[in-house]
Amino acid sequence: MADNDTSQEKTEEPTHKKLRDAKQKGQVPRSKELNSMSVMVAGATGLLLMGPFMIAHLAQMMRSGFSLSREQIMNPAELFSHFQEALLTAAVGISPFLMLMTVIALATPMILGGWAFSVGSMAFKTDRLNPLSGLKRIFSANGLMELIKALAKFFVVSAIAVSFLWGNLDQFLGLGQEAFLPALNHAAWLFGYSFLVMSSSLILIAAIDVPFQLWDHSKKLKMTMQEVRDEMKETEGRPEVKSKIRALQQEMAQRRMMEDVPTADVIITNPTHYAVALRYDPEKMAVPVVVALGRDLIALKIREIASESGVEIFEAPPLARALYAHGQLGKEIPGQLFYAVAQVLAFVFQLQRARNQGLDLPDRPEPYVPPEEKS
């Protein structure tokens, strides 16, 4: 029971597949405080930098609108033309600021959770209309966090606003003693600067909210040990299926190996427990290659195919065991066995030539296998 209870606890970090599936469903970490902070700070900065440009265009629009003659006002076509020019002037003046706000509003969410678009998240869900579900959301950890953030924003922004206004009280009171246009420009600059300072105070709230949203998102996606095991089975396949696949792969590899036995020059045997087939083409190979190897039933099958194909079988138990232990299918023979294999191949080639030409058969060699290679 204890093991079962432990396996049902969500203690494991979400896997890559879990995170990928959640992102496809639109479940990504998002921070409203980060979004609002970025928009507010970018807006305040944009007003300070682009304010003169926007005011100049708006002033031009107003001058053009207030300088119409009576004849132009009474002429509908002329009046519509001036109206179009005024709209164009205003659009040119505020379009850079609007473009900046649009880019910031779209780019900021991608910083935290990346781009995520899901049609399913926009689907109508009846549980959203359930009052009980709404109450659960209000009195949940997220609801408590939202309340704390709202209070924190109120106190932080209020404290910074009061401190800033108190520190610049002389400048605000001095506006009444300035000329109209300089006072208007000065007031616009103070407004923009105040807006930037108060917006920057939201950085503190965002710095707290972003880690919380990342932690909350990870907590919601945590998995139980059983879920991790089930996902591994789905991803990598069930053990019985994998075992069947490995068996089929081994069967196919053995079939291909047996097809290469007739191409061998010699089969070195134990004589019954091991069999290693070697091929050597002096014009194409620098070193003999292992084309087949096996033990017991596979070794018996290699010998049977070799006998049917007329491949020479050479009994050398120490060499056969060493080749089986250190050789690899399709690879060159180990360097420490070069001399022993060369003795066998030289004998096999001499034996074939003697049989073809009716000469005396060569003496059978005893291949030298280093003591450390014997098993």
Image (cartoon, rainbow, N blue to C red):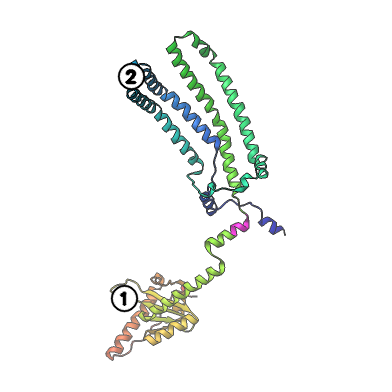
**SS at mark 1?**
loop
Q: Which residue is mark 1?
A: 281
**Left or right, residue 15 beside residue 134:** left
Q: Position of residue 243 (x, y in %)?
A: 53, 70
Frontmost residue, 64 versus 107: 64
Q: Which residue is mark 2?
A: 72
Asked if residue 270 shows in the view, the reply is no
Could you tell me which residue is drawn at 40 percent across and 23 percent down?
54
Frontmost residue, 94 versus 243: 94
Q: Position of residue 354 (x, y in %)?
A: 30, 88
Q: Amino acid at mark 2?
A: Gln
Query: Which residue extends farthest right?
Result: 1
Q: Position of residue 278 (x, y in %)?
A: 38, 77
Could you tell me which residue is drawn at 51 percent across and 21 percent down?
194
Frontmost residue, 165 versus 275: 165
Above or below 239: residue 147: above
Which residues make up the magenta segment? 224-229
Asked if residue 233 shows in the view, the reply is yes
Q: CA–CA distance between discs 1 and 2? A: 103 Å
Q: Amino acid at mark 1?
A: Asp
